[in-house]
Image: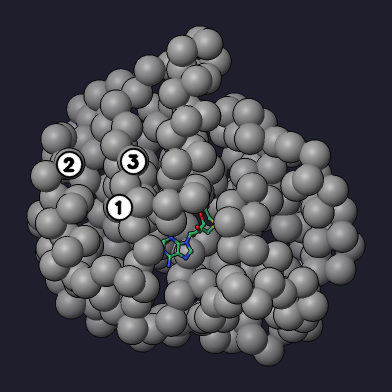
Amino acid sequence: MKVHETAFVVSTYRSYHEEISKDNYAKLWNNKDTDALIPSILDTISRHEAILHSIRNRFFYERMASFFNTNNGGTLINFGSGFSMYQFSFSDSVSTIEIDKKDIIDYKKEKIDNWTKEGKLPFRDVEYVAIDFNQNSTDQIIQIIKPLIKNEPTFILIEGVFFFLDRSTTNKLFQIFKGLQNPGDITGSVTYLPEVENTKVYHRLLHYFDSNNDTNDSFSHQTIPHSYFSSIDGYTIKEKTDEFELSKIYAPNIEICTKNEILNETMYLLERV
Ligand SMILES: C[S@@+](CC[C@H](N)C(=O)[O-])C[C@H]1O[C@@H](n2cnc3c(N)ncnc32)[C@H](O)[C@@H]1O
C-alpha cells in the first residue's frame, strides 16, 4: 500500500462511523478503489480499525473545537493532513494550513475548491502547502509556514504520520513546531508506544504493509516512547490518552476486552511553554 492510499483509507473509516467521528464530510472522498482495499485490512489486521480511527478523529475534533471556541478562532496547522476535513465543521473564524506531500495537496485543493463552488462544503480560509518533511530543513519549513499564520493562537495537528517517519525527521518537526508556536499554543499528536510492538495485531499490521509494499514508497515503522514526549524542548504534556480509553467514552458498545487486542494509538496534547 502506498502512503497516500493510507490517507484515503482513514478518511473512509471516518465516513463509516460519522456518529462517532463527527466528520460529516469524509464521505466526499469515498471511492471504489479504497472501498475494495478495506475488507481485507479489517479481516487480516483488526476489525476494529474503522471505529478506532473514528474515535481518534472525535478526540481531536472535541479538543480543537474547545480550543478555538475558547479563543474565538485561530489557526489549525495540519501536518500530514491527508483528507482531514475538520475545518469545515468549525466556525469560519478558524483558518487552516494544510501540509502534505505534493500529490495529496494538489488533489485535495482541486477537489475542495470544486466542492466549495458546488455548495457541498462551506467556504473556509485554507492555505495548501506541499512539503516532504524528509526533504526540507527546519528553517526552510518555518519560513514557508510562518507567513501563512493569519490568526493566533495555533493548534498544530500531526495525526497518523509519525509511524511513517524516522526519529530524525520527528525531531526536526518538533523544532519546527517550537519555531511556529507561542506559549499556550497546542500541538496534538498520535503515536504507537513501543509496547504495541509486542502485540499480535501490530505484527499483523507490519505483515500487511510488507506484503502489500510498493518499493518506491518505503517508510519507517516508528514507535515512540512516553519519555520522548515528556522531554520535548519547549513543550509540556497537557493530556495523554489512548484509543482504548476513549472507546469507553465514544463507542461504549464495541467489544474490546484488552488494549492488546487492538492497534491502540496514543494521543498527546502538548502545550507550548
Ligand atoms: C495515514 S495518513 C493520515 C492523514 C490525516 N492526518 C488523517 O489522520 O486522516 C498519513 C499522511 O501523512 C503524509 N505523509 C507521510 N509522510 C510524509 C512526509 N515525509 N512528508 C509529508 N507528508 C507525509 C501522507 O502523505 C498522508 O497524507
Q: Is residue 182 left or right of residue 25?
A: left
Spatial CA distance of label 2 from label 1 is 13 Å
Spatial CA distance of label 3 from label 1 is 15 Å
| Residue 180 x/y as whole percent | 15, 57
Front residue of 125/204: it is: 125
| Residue 124 x/y as whole percent | 34, 23
* Residue appearing at x 38%, y 27% in the figure: 90
| Residue 131 x/y as whole percent | 34, 58
| Mark 1 secondary-structure assignment | strand
- Res. 66 visible in picture: no
* Residue appearing at x 13%, y 56% in the figure: 143
Identify which amino acid the numbered label 1 is placed on. Ile
- Return the residue at label 2: 148
* Residue appearing at x 66%, y 31% in the figure: 27
Q: In this view, does 22 lie to the left or right of 134?
A: right
Which quadrant holds residue 209? bottom right
Q: Do the residues labelled 2 and 1 touch (CB within 8 Å)?
A: no
Front residue of 188/81: it is: 81
Q: Height in image: 75 above or below 190?
A: above
Q: Which of marks 2 and 1 is in front?
A: 2
Say which mark, if any, is on residue 24: none
- Return the residue at label 3: 128
* Residue appearing at x 21%, y 35% in the figure: 74
Give the quadrant of the N terminus. Answer: bottom right
Q: In this view, does 148 lie to the left or right of 237?
A: left
Q: Given the current orientation, which residue lies at the most extreme bottom position? A: 198
